[in-house]
Image: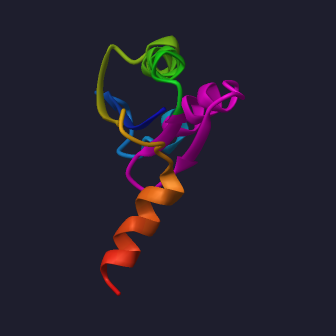
Amino acid sequence: MAIVEISVLPMGTDQPSISSYVAACYQALENETQLKHQLTPMSTIIEGDLDKIMDAVKKMHKVPFNEGVQRVVTTVTIDERTDKSLSMEAAVESVIESTR
């Protein structure tokens, strides 16, 4: 099980806002029903099998190209553990517990 953070940035768009591209990328992820995910203000977090996540990452990366963008920069951060189960909720709870 892995937790992956992805940020897809279309470059050279006609407007400063990229929310329509982000929404289209997120919709591509929504179609991957076996993956748990969470949209945040700056990125999207995905939890699941790493191979399935990477397939979804490729699809998300290609979305702006399909909408006419000529350059896309995608950042991916992978957190994977082999010593114990990993989940978004457990990672957040671990940080909160450490503050108490």
Horizontal side of 76 relative to 3 (left or right) equals left
Which of these two is toward me, 76 or 66? Answer: 76
| Viewer-proximal residue among 46 and 62 | 46
Say which quarter of the image contains residue 23. Answer: top right
Looking at the image, how many numbered discs can be counted on the residues? Answer: 0
Start and end of the magenta stretch?
A: 22-47
| 37 relative to 32, above or below | below
Q: Is residue 55 left or right of residue 78?
A: right
Q: Position of residue 73 (x, y in %)?
A: 27, 25
Quarter of the figure with residue 3: top left
Which color scheme did the rendering employ for the protein?
rainbow
Q: Nearer the viewer, residue 86 or 75?
A: 86
Tell me what residue is drawn at x 52 percent, y 38 percent. 47
In the rendering, at what x and y percent does residue 83 appear? 36, 38
Quarter of the figure that contains the C terminus: bottom left
Relative to 41, is 78 on the left or the right?
A: left
* Residue 28 is a magenta residue: yes
Extreme front residue here?
83
The residue under the point 54% across, 18% down is: 52
Q: Position of residue 56 (x, y in %)?
A: 53, 20
* Residue pictured at 39% horizontal, 66% vertical: 94
> Is 33 in front, or is 9?
33
Question: Which residue sits furthest bottom?
Answer: 100
Task: Examine the structure image and report whether residue 4 is included in the region drawn in magenta.
Answer: no
Locate residue 81, reporting x and y percent.
35, 36
**Image point (31%, 76%), residue name:** 98
